Image (cartoon, rainbow, N blue to C red):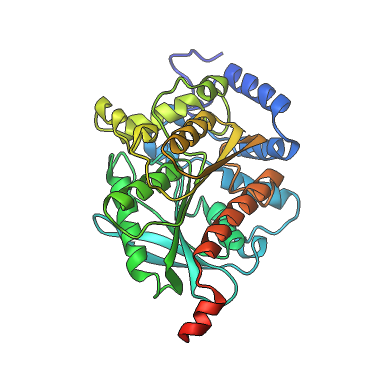
Amino acid sequence: MNHPANPPVDEHGKPNPIVNAVSNAVAALRADDDQLDLAEAHEALGPKAIEKLTVQEARAQPTVADAVRALLQREGKPTDPQALVPGVRSSDLQVEGAAGPLPATLYTPPGSGPFPLVLYFHGGGWVIADRHVYDGGARGLCAQSGAIVLSVDYRQAPEHKFPAAWDDALAAYRWLIAHASRLGGDPTRLALAGESAGGNLAMATAIAARDAALRQPLHVVSVYPVAQTSLNTESYLENAIAKPLNRAMVKWFVDHLINHENELKDTRLQLIEADLGRLPPVTLINARLDPLRSDGAKLEHALRAAGNAVERREYEGVAHEFFGAAAVLEKAREAQAYAGARLRQAFAAAAPSAAATTATGL
């Protein structure tokens, strides 16, 4: 047996075997069959414990998106995103961030514009991942909403600590307002969306846009957002060793993000204590097997208390990151359809009527 003080190199960052076994046993009791299949495909790729790694090592770990591809390959199914979501076209471009250009992907639905537009922010704890990892969520939203989706890579910590990502998110929204028509979109029909850390950015950007007197988005879709900074909520304790996101990982993300502890009180992170009045309608999506589930519930309560229209759906049997896995998860297909329907409803209410269009000769 190797001495614990001198483990072999390949043991670095490996999950604790006892915790790992307990986590798998709990998931086997609580998760849907297709979620279990996806979790097993992810585990087969040998992911290490993010919270035990350097940032560079963490960014190189296999993702849930990698597991989706592996599962599709194992089942002899196509993995090309354009085959998985037919009709949606994608192209890369750059948008102007707060400190320079940001890489972005534009997803365009079938049909002729001008289309509504959704600015989308990926997850990854503000430290890891990028828009490519979250292609499934952004592409699915495009198909389900009938809107152009612009997915932007904001600056990440620890190279760019708080609030760089939030500054980039607002700058990207300003850019979208200015360039909507050139992208084939309708600048009067805008929305915000995001997953996890990006779900936080979507909400925070709606607040910042209101405070800056910018054109307000018509809707916000926030998927399992970070909405507060306590690690002792009901779902953090219940899902402390869940996969693919656990309590220790969130602490690791936040430790790399902030400059000092006082920033945990900043309402861009502590969204539930922000001024939430006069915001557009919000759709919140949560997974039951997720440490962030209670964040969504708390945000729903705070938004409602501030007088906003809000709906939240909690999906049983699935875990954090499920939303973008519609190629293999039934609940993800349901959640994407729900988010798309909510966006369509918001855009339809703001669209000029046919009678008005005819009357004005437009």
Viewer-side residue, 238 vs 57 = 238
Q: Quadrant of the N terminus?
A: top right
From the viewer's perspective, is 165 left or right of 319?
left
- The relative height of residue 94 versus residue 279 in the rendered view (above or below) is below
Residue sitting at 69 percent across and 59 percent down?
78
Residue 15 quadrant: top right
Q: Is residue 362 in view from this perspective?
A: no
Residue 227 lies, in percent from the top left, at 42, 34
From the viewer's perspective, is 257 left or right of 61?
left
How many marks can you see?
0
Residue sitting at 57 percent across and 21 percent down?
238
Residue 305 lies, in percent from the top left, at 44, 34
Residue 87 quadrant: bottom right
Residue 27 lies, in percent from the top left, at 67, 27
- The relative height of residue 254 versus residue 171 in the rendered view (above or below) is above
Q: Is residue 267 in view from this perspective?
A: yes
Viewer-side residue, 236 vs 94 = 236
User: Furthest-bottom residue in view?
Assistant: 361
Residue sitting at 75 percent across and 36 percent down?
33
